[in-house]
Amino acid sequence: MASPHGFASLTYSGITRTCSSQRYHRLIPQFNKKIQSCSRVSIIICNSQNPSFAVAKRSKIRDLRLFNSVELDGFLTSDDEGEMSEGFFEAIEELERMNREPSDVLEEMNERLSARELQLVLVYFSQEGRDSWCALEVFEWLRKENRVDEETMELMVSLMCTWVKKLIEGKQDVGFVADVLVDMDCVGLKPGFSMIEEAVSIYWEMGEGERAVSFVKEVLRRGIGYQEDRAEGHKVGPAGYLAWKMMVDGKYRDAVNLVIDLKESGLRPEAYSYLIAMTAVVKELNEFAKALRKLKAFSKSGLVAELDPETVGLMEKYQSDLVADGVRLSNWVIQEERPSLRGLGLVHERLLAMYICAGRGLEAERQLWNMKYVGKEADSGLYDIVLAICASQKEEGPIARLVSRTEVMGSVHKKKTLTWLLRGYMKGGHFDDAAETVIKMLDCGLYPEFVDRVAALQGLRKRIRQTGDVETYVKLCKRLSDEELAGPCLFYLHLKKYPLWIIKML
């Protein structure tokens, strides 16, 4: 027998003890007028003007349909009306009196009640103004007697979902809601989803974000709410689910802060929630990078003022703090879960995405090799992206290691990788290296795209005005001309000391 923990009246929250037996009972506040049905069951519960119950007799089966305004047309058919036994009404009356435990009453009348009548008993005690806890006790007895089929389980899940929803809508204390969910588990209610996650979802979709967080904390304090995800091989729970809900709504920073706050307050969220929070870090970094690119474009076009050093410093700090949070979360996954090689692959995958979004080439390259080491090979496109980032920062070691992959590549993939290298150099303003890359591609029989050739030449030409060095520019123009990728070029050189112009055709 599961033990109830409290009582909620129809008009106020409080704790009251019923007379007769030693049991405590929960009376749930008024249900919605409509409970979403499961399969064949349709239940509509309306406000009742008179909550008192007059014992129905067999001759008044039609009154049962309006039993405290409960509509059961989808459950009780006209053919069933003639089959309702006297024992059904006697069971309702006896359970209403609460002189004995429900299990004793049902055990005594077991032979007289059909499966349909037992389902209807569940429905009756789940309606407004009735002892809803009794429905749980009836279900517990049914489970022990092995009389819970798929339809009965669906019916009970539907009733309990509505029960939990009304508790939350009625602003019941989160601890009380957690008690109810514990009791549902105790009586053997095993739906195909997590009732705790359902409660978190209800809080969140009602706009009760703070109460959702409080509920998750309450559940974690009790150490309940975890279930094994066989596909991924890790435990999922309320912290990760709430973080995921926040992430879906675009509240990436809130999701990260939630998991970190839970961990630092000693509540130990499930390890999978750290992976969810790491995903939120990646998404926040990506959104931050997109916003920063737009801001720089507006500043370049004169639509907004140029960013001052203090603002730039604050933006860099925000990005650095996000990266630090992601690293902390990854360390917690490894320390607490000691994941398999596959689990480590997920951690390194998220770290790789995080460093790519933050533009940290050296750290990103390290994660590529970490992923390879644990057997989770990254996509070739990710190698190219990291190569471009390293090229923009002129990280010579990582560049050499990543470019060495081209030795075993076909011409198509090789051209793609060297194009990323070329564009990375140009983005970082390293135009001498960009010119060498163009020449290297030509030596391999690969022809850079027209836009890339023009960008390299323009970058070198701008540098000439600053340094006066024309050697690299001339060398690249000559090679492009030899490959018939550029027309004849005229070079103008002005000697100020001698008012002299030198013109040469290449």
Image (spheres, grey):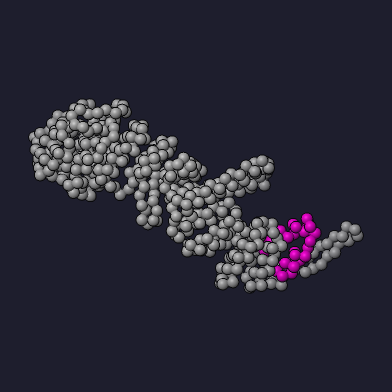
Rendering coords of residue 115 (x, y %): 15, 45
Would you say the magenta stretch is mainly helix, strand or loop?
helix
Q: Residue at x 53, y 64 (%)?
A: 380
Q: Nearer the viewer, residue 268 or 385?
A: 268
Would residue 254 be found to the left or right of residue 234 on screen? right
Does the stretch in magenta take in 225? no
Rendering coords of residue 16 (x, y %): 27, 28
Rendering coords of residue 203 (x, y %): 39, 38
How many labels were placed on the picture?
0
* Residue 366: quarter of image: bottom right
Q: Quadrant of the N terminus?
A: top left
Rendering coords of residue 443 (x, y %): 66, 72
- Which residue is most to the right? 498
Would residue 281 be found to the left or right of residue 423 on screen? left
Residue 144 drawn above or below residue 388: above
Residue 343 drawn above or below residue 202: below
Q: Quadrant of the C terminus?
A: bottom right
Does the stretch in magenta take in 468? yes
Would residue 248 be found to the left or right of residue 64 on screen? right
Residue 307 visible somewhere in the drawing = yes
Q: Residue at x 85, y 60 (%)?
A: 494
Q: Nearer the viewer, residue 410 or 371?
A: 371
Q: Nearer the viewer, residue 203 or 339?
A: 339
Q: Residue at x 13, y 34 (%)?
A: 94
Q: Residue at x 39, y 40 (%)?
A: 221
Range of magenta residues: 453-481
Q: Nearer the viewer, residue 254 or 496?
A: 254
Residue 43 visible somewhere in the drawing = no
